[in-house]
Amino acid sequence: MLKLRNFDPFEQRQLFTMMSDPAVFPYVRHKATSYEEFVEVNAWTIEAEGRGELISRVIMNEENQPAGVINLFDIADRSGFIATWLGTSHQGKGLNQVAKKEFLHEVFTTTTIESVYMCIRQTNIRSQKAARKLPYVVTANEEGRARFAALREDYASFELLEIPKALFQAYEVGALERAAAFEAMSCEVVYA
């Protein structure tokens, strides 16, 4: 479902086309107005990940085609800010929620990150509703709000949510237990 960013021209062209859609473009953090600029942004992203400044993955759909991007930006003090965008043809299919779970699992199990923040524009009702469906999301604490305010002058126009590592991992354990219980209930009973 997720893969590392790369220099594959076909994949970059698909991502650029999706990102250029007027319904997607306003919500993309690192915008590019031409394909050449997108290639440069992609190269910068790969280099920045190598320096530990961010984590970026391409979201793949069920046919293993690029569907969007998920990133963790502004990594500092064992926290960072998550941002996701999907092409319009991939929205509303549950792909974002699945990608977030996979990405958060990777982030929380392979790094020292303890909190991931989600900043959602007050005008982006669709994303607010989607985020509130996630059982491991809470309203950000004062520390998170102060950190966000230091990064963005327009912080007041965003809703700030937090995904604490401990809460996400508790959710994962609970989800695994529920899946095991469901599997046990659905096993065929065999009589000797």
Image: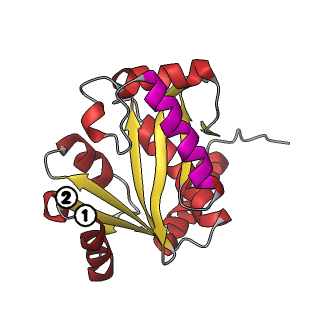
Give above or below for 146 relative to 106. Answer: below
Does the residue at mark 2 contact the one at mark 1 (Cβ under 8 Å)? yes
Give the residue drawn at x 44%, y 25%: 16
* Percent x, y of residue 102: 57, 49
> Please, what is the three-letter code of the amino acid marked with disc 1?
Arg
Check disc 2 and report the residue beneath it: 158
* Percent x, y of residue 150: 28, 73
Give the residue drawn at x 46%, y 31%: 38
The prevailing secondary structure element of the residues shown in magenta is helix
Q: Circle 1 sits in a helix, a strand or a loop, which is it?
A: loop
Coloration mode: secondary structure
- Quarter of the rendering containing residue 154: bottom left
* Percent x, y of residue 22: 24, 25
> Please, what is the three-letter code of the amino acid marked with disc 2?
Phe
Give the residue drawn at x 58%, y 65%: 108
The answer to which of 118 and 105 lies nearer the viewer is 118
Location of the C terminus (image quadrant): top right
Check disc 1 and report the residue beneath it: 152
Q: How far apart are the two marked residues, 2 and 1, measured between alpha carbons? A: 10 Å
Give the left or right position of residue 184, taking residue 43 as reference: right
Looking at the rendering, the stretch of residues picked out in magenta corresponds to 35-49
Res 140 seen here? no
Query: Which numbered disc flags the more N-terminal residue, 2 or 1?
Result: 1
Q: Circle 2 sits in a helix, a strand or a loop, which is it?
A: strand
Give the left or right position of residue 163, taking residue 122 as reference: right
* Residues packed near mark 1 inside 10 Å, few (<14), some (14 to 19) or many (20 plus): few
